[in-house]
Image (cartoon, rainbow, N blue to C red):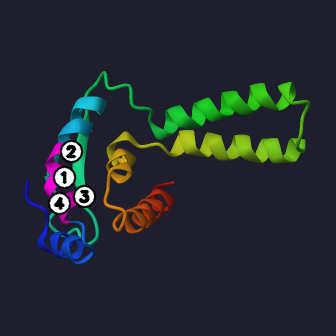
Amino acid sequence: MLVPPVVRNKALAAGAARWLDELPVLIADLEADWGITVGPPYPDATKAFVAEAEPAPASGLPTGADKGRWLIGYIETTWPELDRPCSERAVEHALACAARRVAAHDHERAVLIALALLRRAEPTVMPHAISACGIACSAIE
């Protein structure tokens, strides 16, 4: 696996040589654990290893729409069980947000952020990687 030179150099400068060495094993573990196939890295990445991944049809990975539907069910069930701890307006807003998430899901444009890679990353890389994931997640939601 070829890590783009800019990413490799930044990882080495951050003291993350071990992360670079272990990256092929980490990716292979993710492929096995999640039933995905990771493609070659995008050559223009500058701060992280970024690659397209194709989930296996039976991977069981939830989509954004699945998560939105789950959230709707959870709110509708939990709010009355907890004796309506917040206003109905707040609940309606939360349900509308979840419904927008369901409606906005586009399988062709979906992004999977592999946090399992972050859990095993070098401590010096972790804050930068989490920040990058936060930005990516914010951009797609």
Residue 64 in picture, x, y percent from top left: 49, 40
Q: CA distance from mark 4 to mark 2?
A: 11 Å
Q: In the image, 15: left or right of 127?
A: left
Q: Residue at x 66, y 47 (%)?
A: 97
Q: Residue tagged by mark 4?
A: 20
| Callout 4–callout 1 Cβ contact below 8 Å | yes
Q: Residue at x 16, y 57 (%)?
A: 41
In this view, 110 is above or below 7: above
Q: Secondary structure at mark 3?
A: loop
Q: Residue at x 23, y 75 (%)?
A: 10
Q: Residue tagged by mark 3?
A: 50
- Residue type pointed to by label 1: Leu
Could you say which quadrant of the image residue 124 lies in? bottom left
Q: In the image, 128: left or right of 71?
A: left
- Residue type pointed to by label 2: Ile
Residue furthest to the top: 58
Q: Residue tagged by mark 2?
A: 27
